[in-house]
Image (cartoon, rainbow, N blue to C red):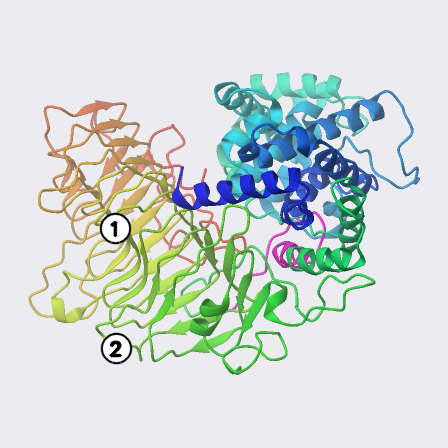
Amino acid sequence: MTETTVNLTSRTAALVVAAKSGDRDALHELTASHLPLLYNVIGRALNGHADVDDLVQETMERVVRGIRGLREPERFRSWVVAIAYREIQLHLRKAARGAPPRSALPDVPDPAADFAERTVTELVLTGQRRELVEATRWLDDGDRHLLALWWHEAAGDLTRTELATALGIGQPHAAVRLQRMKAQLEVARTIVRSLRETPRCAGLETVAHGWDGVARPLWRKRLARHVRDCAACGGHRSGLIAPERLLLGIGLVALPAAALAAAARVALKSPLLAPSTSLLQAFQHKTAAVATVAVVAGGGFAFAVHETPDPPSSPGQAAPAAPFAPASPAAPVTSTTTPPVQSAVAGTIVVSPSGADTGDGSVDRPFATLSKAAAVVRPGQTIALRGGTYRPVDPVTITTSGTAEQRITLTNYRDELPVIDASRIPADKWAVTQQADHWTVQGLEIKGSRSHAYVCLACKHNVFRRLSVHDNVESGLTLRDDGTVDNQVLDSDFYRNRNPADRGQTGIGLGIKFGTGDGNVVRGCRAFDNADDGFDLGDFHSPVTLEYNWAYGNGVNRWSVRDWQSNGNGFTLGGGSPPAAAAHKLRHNAAWDNIHHGFADSGNNAALQFTNNTAYRNGATGFAVATAPATLRSSVAIDNPTAVSANTALQTSRNTWDEGTWTRSMFRSTDPAAAQGPRPASGTLPATTFLTTGNGMGASMNGN
């Protein structure tokens, strides 16, 4: 457990103890801070049903009534989620027995239906998020509820411990249930794809004869049996993107203004509290900020499942697309007693190239610099950068941390593209330095730094996604130092970083270096055309997971520098003096056209794990693992001078060098144009057949 998490848990426990003793403000703060989570858990499970407000209120009443009996104050959060989960189950059991709903509106959807189904009619969904939404209709109630909880875990709102507590089971049992649910979800997604196929498989047409289009259990069994056994229909699984990646594009449930007053009334009814008008106003004031954050994250739509439009891009490169489009602060959540909130206090801090740091951070009076916004931001708030070019003259420092429950978000405003041109910052300074935890940084372009563009020091629980970081001297993004824990770098591009004066030995795409820390993941990223390495884990002493990443064209002398001496590896997995030993895990990564190795252990003598990776047409060795006692399975090395380094400790199976002579003809395509082209609006890797094999060997090249 991290220090931040310990502090957060300790504060919550202290508030619980105070509330049990009759402290009105403590109870008020507990209910206000947990209301957004509660509303999301119940709102998603009931798909925006009219009973959501009532169920939230009933759950809050149970929380307030039962808080005196909570024996372990530090487990308050898990206890609240468990109460919500039980209320959901009771509600759906009543619905299944035919009991009339609390709000008998004729157009209310089935409360047991898919938690995002209504949004299909509200927003235009594209790609696999639409398929995921449809597939959830084929899950049974238990799996649907589990999916709703798992979504919160994937989004960072719940820990695995809290999820297991909500289910009333241990973590190992929860892991098994999640695995089974994911398997059922994959079958359901395959059913959706198979039913959409034109023309359909003849066998599927026979099985589906008489089906009325409703996802009932009987038809689920019949169709699932068919797609499992049918080679044609079962083949649709090969293109499925991992659900956790799709779930990150499903927005938060916006907290209705009516819920603020309802929750306040619940708190005021408590025997622990004496009724007070001032308390009601204080409650509404504090929760208004929380509600506004929810609206910002969800784009102003309840249960918003969406793809964002592709913003303008520079020639030849895809601009980052923001998965969450902030709603305009000019139209925040309001109530009958709380006036509209216009300033940064409400949760959204707006920054614009035409703004002024003497403003208040509102959409009408935005700040001018990221430095100003970073200095005033508080947990739970969002910094939204308007489109245009920012040219700071001083480095940006980020030191305020969010919390597990109230992350801080730095994002582009709506679908606008903010560009940070760091070329005016002194060459001996990093452009952006972050020493803060629980941030989500997304939708930005950063270029021109005469040193490192963005460095995160000993950072924990951060998410970096949909970034475009290029043409900097030292590196695009670097995470470093001891205490670098549980960070994710997703769907981002790092390219053309170089220092021509250093003859190609400086200028990497993404680095996780010079430190320790578990749980770091790099997924769906591209590092290309950098002067030195694409991905560099030099001198990092803890395992990092790299999956579905591409490194290409690194180390090539694109600047006509004399006596060029680049290392130019696609993936460098070691380094330091002595070299770091960390058992990094690599799956479904691809390296091509790098001037040196595709994958290099660089002296790392730990048990590296390679599964389904591809090295193609690199200048030296495909898999240079002469030191590491590595395990390589189902990997491909084609048209490299050497496929794999000799190593007596190497364990290899079903790789191209294990199974006879393989040539480039095994690939469906050797044309990299699509893979090296713009990303789609979803921000995922471009769709391509480049380097795909179709035989289970090598990288899948489809982000799944």
Relative to residue 478, is residue 70 depicted above or below?
above
Dot 2 or dot 1: first in sequence order is 2
In the rendered image, the quadrant that contains the N terminus is top left
Q: Is any atom of residue 659 visible in this view?
A: no
Image: 247 above or below 413: above
Residue underneath mark 2: 426
Q: Position of residue 217 (x, y in %)?
A: 73, 19
Would residue 376 appear left or right of 519 to someone viewing this image?
right
Q: Nearer the viewer, residue 429 or 411?
A: 429
In this rendering, would 356 be left or right of 564?
A: right
Identify the mark at residue 481; answer none if there is no mark: 1
Locate residue 106, reporting x and y percent: 93, 39
Foreground: 268 or 305?
268
Report the span colored magenta.
291-312
Tell me which residue sits at (39%, 56%) in the image: 436
Q: From this view, report whether residue 278 is shown above or below residue 587.
A: below
* Residue 196: percent from left, percent from top: 67, 35
**Residue displayed at 84% across by 42% down:** 50
